[in-house]
Amino acid sequence: MDISCNKCNSKFKIANNKIPAGKTASLTCPTCKNRISVSSKSKNLEPEQKVEKTESPPKDNTSESSFGGFVTENGYSEDSSVTDENDENKDDDSFGFVEEEGKSAIFFETDPKTIKDITSVIDFLEYSVYKSITIRGGLKKLRYNNYDLIILDENFDNSKNADTNGILLYLKRLKMLTRRNIFVVLLSRQLRTMDYMITLDTSVDLIINRSDIDKFELLLNKGLSDHSTLFRIYKESLKNTGMI
C-alpha cells in the first residue's frame, strides 16, 4: 500500500499485512519525522500499485534512509541491496507498527521461558507487547515507533556486554525529551539487581539480574513507581522555573 505524509507530502510503501485489520497504527515519516496515523480505512492509503525494482537504484537526487531504502524526490522506495532478507525473515514484523491506544512494551530477548514469564506480568499491566530478535530489526522498530517500556538482554543478538549492546548505544544517543518517556529494563547475568550506580552508568532505568527474574513483577512495579515520582518532580521544577 502507498502512504503519503500530510506534512511534507513524501510517499512511501509498506506491505499490506503490516496494518492489522480494523486497527490504527502509527509510524514516522522517513523524510520529515512527522507522525502519521494509518488504518485500513485511512485517507493516507491509496490502492497498491506494482513497482518494478532495479538492481541499482538511481543515485541522483537520492539520499539513503536508515529504514533500509531510499528517500527520493518521488518518495520512499525499497532497495534490495540495503535490506537484508535474512534479518527480515528472522525478525517478526521488522517495521513494528505500534497501536496508538494504550501503553506499549518491546522485548529484546530470545529465551522462550524468560519471554513467557515476563509477558504474563506486562500483559497484566495492560501493555501491548512487541518483540525483536535481531539488533537490525530492533533498531528499525525504535526509529519508527514510540515504546513506553523496553526490556533488553545485555547479551542480546550476541552482544558481549552492556557497553557493546547496539540497542543501548542507540538509547544513549536519544534526546532527553524522548528518552525520559521510556522506561528501560536491562536483564543481566553479571550486574546486580537495582544497582543504582551501574543503572546510571548504563543509561537504563532498572537492572534485574537473571537470578531475580522470579521477582520481576515486584521489581518492575517499584521501578516504574520511582521513575514516575522522579519525573513528576522534574516536570514540576521546570514549570516553577518557567522553562515549560
Image (tube, helix red, strand yellow):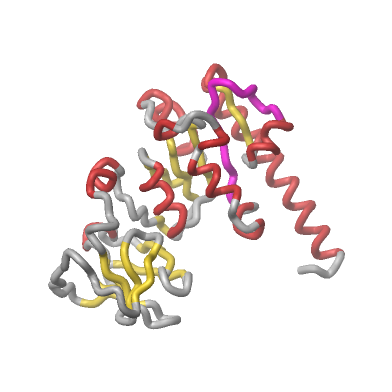
In the picture as drawn, the residue positioned furthest to the right comes out as 241
* Residue 86 point in image, percent of width and height: 24, 44
Q: Quadrant of the N terminus?
A: bottom left
Q: Is 86 drawn above or below residue 220 in the view shown? A: below
Q: Which of 72 and 244 is in front in this view?
A: 72
Q: Give the range drawn in magenta.
A: 182-195
Seen at 69% across and 46% down, the residue is 228
Q: Is residue 51 left or right of residue 124?
A: left
* Residue 64 point in image, percent of width and height: 37, 66
**What count of labels does the image hold?**
0
Q: Is 140 drawn above or below residue 114 in the view shown? A: below
> Residue 191 in magenta?
yes
Q: Is 224 drawn above or below residue 236 in the view shown? A: above
Q: Which of 200 and 169 is in front in this view?
A: 169
Res. 17 image quadrant = bottom left
Seen at 62% across and 40% down, the residue is 204
Q: Nearer the viewer, residue 168 or 210?
A: 168
Q: Which of 222 and 62 is in front in this view?
A: 62
Seen at 38% across and 65% down, the residue is 65
Seen at 29% across and 57% down, the residue is 82
Q: Is residue 97 left or right of residue 199?
A: left
